[in-house]
Image (cartoon, rainbow, N blue to C red):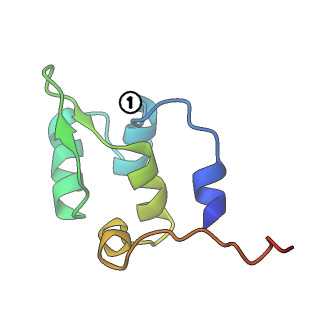
Amino acid sequence: MTAVFEMPISSETLSPEELDEITGSCRRDKQVEWLEQNRWEFFLALNGKPKVGRLYARLKLAGINPHALATTGGWVPDFSGIGG
C-alpha cells in the first residue's frame, strides 16, 4: 500500500475532468447525488462545485476504506530493512 502514497500528486483535489469521469456526469447536482449515493466524502466549494480529496479517491478506487485506516492505527513504517 505504500505505493499509493508514493505516487506524485498534482493537486490535493480531483480535477473537474476526473470528477466527471468518476461520477459519469459533468452536472454538479448529479455529481453530488452520485457522491452521496456511493458514500464518498466531499465538500462543496463556494462556487457550489463538489471537491474530493485525491488521496481519498485513490484509496476508495483501490477498495480501501479510508476510515478503517484511522481506526486501525493507520500506516506503520516498516523498519525491518534497517539492520546494524
Q: Quadrant of the C terminus?
A: bottom right
Q: Residues within 10 Å of mark 1 (few under 14, many from 20)?
A: some
Residue beneath the point at 38% across and 71% down: 69
| Residue 42, percent from left and from top | 22, 46
Looking at the image, residue 1 sits to the left or right of residue 81; the answer is: left
**The one of 81 and 51 positioned closer to us in this rendering:** 81
The image quadrant that residue 27 belongs to is top left
The image quadrant that residue 44 belongs to is top left
Examine the rendered structure and indicate whether residue 16 appears above or below residue 67. Answer: above
Looking at the image, residue 21 sits to the left or right of residue 28; the answer is: right
Residue type for callout 1? Pro
- The residue indicated by pointer 1 is 16
Residue beneath the point at 80% across and 73% down: 81
Residue closest to the far front: 84
| Residue 57, percent from left and from top | 41, 53
Looking at the image, residue 6 sits to the left or right of residue 44; the answer is: right
| Residue 16, percent from left and from top | 38, 30
Element class at badge 1: helix
| Residue 8, percent from left and from top | 63, 39
Residue beneath the point at 43% across and 31% down: 15
Examine the rendered structure and indicate whether residue 48 appears above or below residue 83. Answer: above
Residue closest to the far top: 47
The image quadrant that residue 32 belongs to is top left
Examine the rendered structure and indicate whether residue 77 appears above or below residue 35. Answer: below
Examine the rendered structure and indicate whether residue 23 appears above or below residue 44. Answer: below
Residue beneath the point at 42% across and 70% down: 74
